[in-house]
Amino acid sequence: MEILNVIYALLSIGLGCFGWLAPRYTLGALDLTMGETTMGMSEIRASAGALFVGMGVGALLIGTPVAYLMLGFCWLGAAIGRATSVALDGTNTKKTMFFAVEIAVGLAAIATNWQALAA
């Protein structure tokens, strides 16, 4: 179980680093473009980047099943947002791929750590 939790956290950190440290690349990967200001890049660095880095680092530092469970709920929240976009905005291959990753990591982290709630 511990190795799986570390993998979930490192996945969060790794993917978050793209948004945080390579926002132009992330904008392109997400089919987004820069506007007249740098707020778009700032939002990518924050919400698609450092937020995920912070979640992963926090889970590793706290190191309890509940911390990893919360990491799973964060990923599940992203999947719910993605599913809402599919339902309201339409679908495409990228949305489907991102949703698959988000739901898989979220549910896996939750399933791995759910018993911690009973403790």
Image (tube, rainbow, N blue to C red):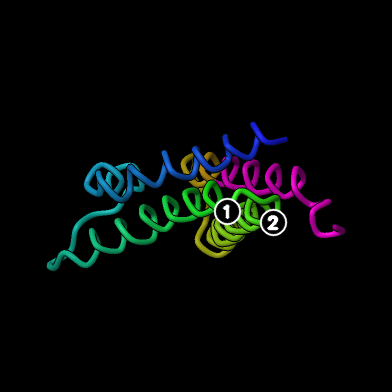
- Left or right of 16: which side holds 44? left
Residue at x-position 41% and y-position 39%: 14
Q: Amino acid at mark 1?
A: Ile
Picture coordinates of residue 68, whole percent (x, y): 64, 50
> What SS does tag 2 mark?
helix
Whether pointer 2 and pointer 1 mark residues with C-beta atoms closer than 8 Å, the reply is yes
Q: Which residue is mark 2?
A: 66
Residue at x-position 62% and y-position 43%: 105
Picture coordinates of residue 47, whole percent (x, y): 39, 61
Picture coordinates of residue 111, whole percent (x, y): 77, 46
Q: Which residues are magenta?
A: 99-119
> What SS does tag 1 mark?
helix
Q: Amino acid at mark 2?
A: Val
Question: Magenta stretch containing residue 93, yes or no?
Answer: no
Question: Quick one: which residue is furthest to the left in this view?
Answer: 36
Label 2: how many Cα within 10 Å (few below 14, some 14–19, many 20+): some
- Left or right of 92: which side holds 4? right
Residue at x-position 19% and y-position 58%: 34
To which quarter of the image does residue 79 belong? bottom right
Q: Which residue is mark 1?
A: 62
Position of residue 53 relative to residue 85, above or below, is above
Label 1: how many Cα within 10 Å (few below 14, some 14–19, many 20+): few
Residue at x-position 56% and y-position 51%: 59
To which quarter of the image does residue 104 belong? top right
Please state which of residues 83 and 39 is positioned toward the viewer in this rendering: 39
Position of residue 53 relative to residue 15, above or below, is below
Image quadrant holding the N terminus, namely top right
Of labels 2 and 1, the one closer to you:
1
Image quadrant holding the C terminus, namely bottom right
